[in-house]
């Protein structure tokens, strides 16, 4: 009997998703089904961020699988921490944010989706204090979603929302905020079937790409979306994007970080923003969409990733000493040489060259080749990418490209600039 009791106790500990967390003595409820902006949660010491002396590398001190350093810049947004499973009492902790579900559960089994909102055009409204310029409004998203009848339809998931404080333009999001979002997904991973991240479109491809590297062994959908027109406008693309993102986040066929926009689901690490004013704002230039939405949802099942093996691991350390340089015909190679030399003296870790065509430099620019060789000798990674929207780098195809290979330059193949910069930052962050 003693042995059986011990096994039963151990099983209960394993089944409790909160058992491995360090609890604190108080929690701060946040009510999202109102127009009142939620108060920012207190952050326990293990999730705090501080200003780094060098301010060059970022990681969350509460991450697993990444470098745990307590000297890193403070993010502009407070982490959500663990979002409570329901609106009732939860284990007491300032790392928990109990939240009310948007709609009541009628007893049927529903998928559960957590919506993390960072801001962006989707949450904006004209601000009279700023000459009617669009500005994120806290609480608008949650109020709007609480009134959406579509979310009560059969087959739609149960939705819980968290709006970060403050809401930000995507131009203000960087590696520190990427780590906050990834950490919140990691913290809530066992409580939800999928995740939707709402943000502005300008840097969405960078953020989504970064999370595709940060979340190792991801076996649930993480869908990014936003809009070109605010949700509060009579004609907008926000409502459709939001509903379809929730649908894809509640399916279990495409389990990776993706971007849904307009009528297609895209692999995040292959995507770029391609238009500033059309509703079809994103594309994967060297890859077909994972799914297209028309009368029905058409998935490219042959592009689906195989199930990940192992538990989800979080890596939030990102190297930011990365520089991108786009060449133009007739450039002054002396200026480029001085810029690279100055950067290497400032501990530059990687240089991304956006070259012509298949990865070519002018054959008469021998001084640039010598500069790249010297940079490689100092430990700088030099990556060659193409300025073309589609296609791939093939440096050995022409003699000018062969000179780059001899200088130790690495080909980026058909990767986007977003993928190159985020992957380089991630790999250096891993050490």
Image (cartoon, rainbow, N blue to C red):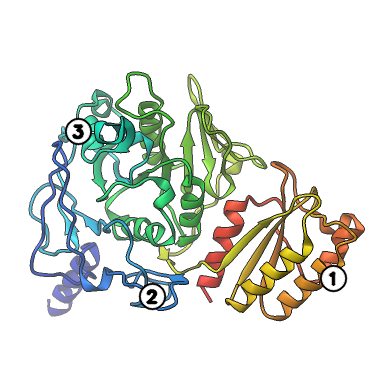
The residue pinned by badge 1 equals 406
Which residue lies at the image location 16% right of the left edge and 71% below the top edge?
Answer: 9
Please name the residue shown 42% across and 43% down the image: 223
Residue 187 in the figure: left or right of residue 418: left
Dot 3, how many residues are within 10 Å of its Cα: few (below 14), some (14-19), or many (20+)? some
Q: Position of residue 253 (x, y in %)?
A: 47, 41
Q: Describe the element under mark 3 as helix, strand or loop.
A: helix
Q: Nearer the viewer, mark 1 or mark 2?
A: 2
Q: Earlier in the sequence, mark 1 or mark 2?
A: 2
Q: Is residue 222 visible?
A: yes
Which one is nearer the viewer's eye here, 6 or 400?
400
The residues tagged by marks 1 and 3 sit, at their Cα atoms, a distance apart of 59 Å
Q: Quadrant of residue 362?
A: bottom right
Residue 341, placed above or below residue 266: below
Residue identified by numbered label 2: 52
Q: Going 68% across and 80% down the picture, which residue do you hit?
A: 378
- Residue 231 is situated, as x and y percent measured from the top left of the image, at 32, 28
- Which marked residue is nearer to the observer: mark 2 or mark 3? 2
Q: Quadrant of residue 234?
A: top left
Asked whether residue 216 is in view, the answer is no
Circle nearer the N terminus (1, 3): 3
The numbered mark, 2 or 3, whose residue comes first in the sequence reads: 2
Do the numbered discs 1 and 2 sit on residues whose CB atoms are within 8 Å? no
In the rendered image, which residue does mark 3 sit on?
143
Under tag 1, what secondary structure?
A: helix
Pick whichever, 337 or 197, lies toward us. 337
* Label 2 Cα crowd, 10 Å radius (few <14 / some 14-19 / many 20+): some
The quarter of the picture where residue 335 lies is bottom right
* Percent of width and height locating residue 198: 36, 42
Q: Secondary structure at mark 2?
A: loop
Split into 4 quadrants, where in the image is the N terminus?
Answer: bottom left
């Amino acid at each position: 009997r003693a042995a059986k009791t011990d096994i039963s106790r151990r099983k209960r500990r394993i089944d409790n998703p909160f058992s491995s967390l360090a609890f604190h003595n108080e929690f701060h409820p946040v009510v999202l089904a109102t127009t009142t902006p939620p108060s920012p949660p207190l952050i326990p010491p293990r999730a705090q961020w501080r200003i780094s002396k060098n301010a060059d590398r970022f990681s969350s001190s509460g991450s697993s699988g990444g470098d745990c350093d307590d000297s890193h810049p403070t993010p502009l947004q407070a982490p959500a921490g663990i979002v409570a499973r329901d609106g009732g009492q939860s284990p007491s902790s300032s790392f928990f944010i109990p939240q009310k579900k948007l709609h009541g559960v009628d007893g049927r089994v529903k998928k559960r989706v957590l919506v993390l909102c960072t801001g962006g055009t989707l949450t904006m409204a004209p601000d009279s204090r700023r000459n009617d310029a669009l500005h994120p409004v806290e609480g608008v998203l949650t109020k709007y979603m609480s009134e959406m009848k579509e979310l009560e339809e059969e087959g739609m998931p149960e939705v819980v929302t968290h709006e970060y404080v403050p809401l930000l333009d995507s131009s203000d999001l960087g590696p520190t905020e990427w780590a906050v979002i990834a950490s919140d997904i990691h913290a809530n991973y066992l409580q939800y079937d999928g995740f939707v991240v709402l943000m502005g479109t300008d840097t969405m491809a960078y953020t989504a790409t970064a999370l595709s590297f940060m979340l190792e062994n991801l076996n649930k959908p993480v869908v990014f979306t936003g809009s070109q027109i605010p949700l509060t406008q009579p004609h907008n693309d926000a409502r459709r994007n939001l509903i379809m993102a929730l649908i894809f986040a509640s399916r279990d066929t495409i389990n990776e970080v993706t971007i849904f926009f307009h009528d297609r689901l895209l692999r995040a690490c292959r995507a770029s923003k391609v238009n500033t004013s059309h509703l079809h704002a994103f594309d994967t230039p060297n890859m077909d969409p994972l799914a297209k939405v028309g009368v029905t949802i058409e998935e490219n099942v042959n592009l689906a990733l195989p199930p990940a093996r192992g538990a989800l691991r979080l890596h939030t350390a990102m190297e930011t000493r990365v520089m991108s340089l786009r060449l133009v015909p007739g450039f002054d190679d002396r200026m480029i040489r001085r810029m690279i030399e100055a950067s290497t003296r400032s501990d530059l870790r990687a240089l991304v060259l956006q070259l012509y065509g298949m990865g070519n430099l002018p054959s008469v620019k021998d001084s640039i080749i010598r500069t790249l060789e010297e940079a490689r000798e100092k430990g700088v990674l030099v990556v060659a990418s193409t300025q073309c929207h589609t296609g791939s780098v093939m440096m050995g195809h022409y003699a000018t490209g062969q000179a780059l290979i001899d200088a130790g330059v690495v080909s980026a193949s058909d990767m986007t600039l977003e993928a190159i910069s985020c992957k380089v930052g991630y790999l250096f962050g891993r050490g």
